[in-house]
Image (cartoon, helix red, strand yellow):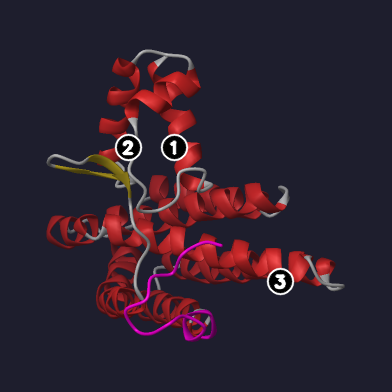
Amino acid sequence: MADEIYEALRAMLLDHTIPPGQRINIDSVARELNVSQTPVREALARLESDDLVIKQPLRGYSATELLTVDETDDLFRFRALIEPWMAGRAAEERSAEDLDELIAEIERGRQSLELDLDATYGELSRHDERFHFLIARIARSDFVRDAYTRAHCQLHVYRLTQAAIARRRASREMDSVEDEDGIFDAKGRGVVTIMEHSLIADAIRAGQTHAAAAHMLDHIESARTRLPLDHASLAGPSARVTPT
């Protein structure tokens, strides 16, 4: 029961049935799911540790907000500093078991492209999170891993921001005569991500420290260049990226 409630709430947050920033009414959720408040509270505690919800004094739980443009810029600067080093270190420290996990994760990412559009958004986000955390673990630096883990909330919220932008684009394009192009664009972004992840993984497997770091930096910069046009349509540098 507890796991089912957790998964149901997680899905509601990821697909924005509960919008970013919205306060979560425990009683309403319990009635909607036809359960008592206890498993809902337990699920929310787990979701807080996943950084999907935030608990505030006298306010209770709210869905995590999406990032502002300025916050996104700061996040990319952080990633450009730490993740290339992590990839290079992973190329030095990787074990046979690590390489098996990398190969398996790349394949999971490829399989996500075969899903329907909405499922692809969610699964690609989960693949991206697993892939980058796997590299952080393979790097075997407690200090850097802890720094990366502390940024987990921001990284996860960034992925929610990407999903919101992708949904908005797909919705706009699919309402036009170019609906197939809209789907191709969304899927195409996933194809690019998997290709870039594969280059990083191949360099790590080959023990190519500099190549792994360079491919990771290219990957981060590539992801950043896909955001400015979306951000430019917002009200200003402090506007939040919100789903429509």
Which amino acid does the dot numbered 2 rest on?
Leu
Q: Quadrant of the N terminus?
A: top left
211 or 234: nearer the eye? 234
User: Which secondary structure lies at badge 2?
Assistant: helix
Which amino acid does the dot numbered 1 rest on?
Arg
Say few, some or many: other residues with alpha carbon within 10 Å of mark 1 (under 14 / 14 to 19 / 20 or more). Answer: many
Whole-Å distance between the Cαs marked 3 and 2? Answer: 31 Å
237 or 155: nearer the eye? 237
Circles 1, 2 touching at the beta carbon (< 8 Å) = yes
Label of residue 47 in the image:
2
Q: Earlier in the sequence, mark 3 or mark 2?
A: 2
Q: Earlier in the sequence, mark 1 or mark 2?
A: 1
Residue 59's spot in the image, x, y percent? 20, 41
Q: Is residue 224 magenta?
A: no
From this view, report whether residue 208 is shown above or below residue 7. below
Which dot, 3 or 1, sits closer to the camera? Answer: 1
The magenta stretch is: 229-244
Q: Which residue is label 1 attached to?
A: 10
Whole-Å distance between the Cαs marked 1 and 2? Answer: 7 Å
Say few, some or many: other residues with alpha carbon within 10 Å of mark 2 (under 14 / 14 to 19 / 20 or more). Answer: many
Q: Is residue 196 left or right of residue 212?
A: right
Whole-Å distance between the Cαs marked 3 and 1? Answer: 26 Å
Residue 136's spot in the image, x, y percent? 29, 58
Which amino acid does the dot numbered 3 rest on?
Asp
Q: Is residue 191 left or right of residue 46?
A: right
Q: Which residue is label 3 attached to?
A: 185
| Residue at (34% x, 72% y) in the render | 68
From this view, report whether residue 198 is shown above or below residue 225. above
| Residue at (58% x, 48% y) in the render | 108
Residue 224's spot in the image, x, y percent? 45, 80
From this view, report whether residue 63 is shown above or below residue 207. above
Q: Is residue 235 magenta?
A: yes
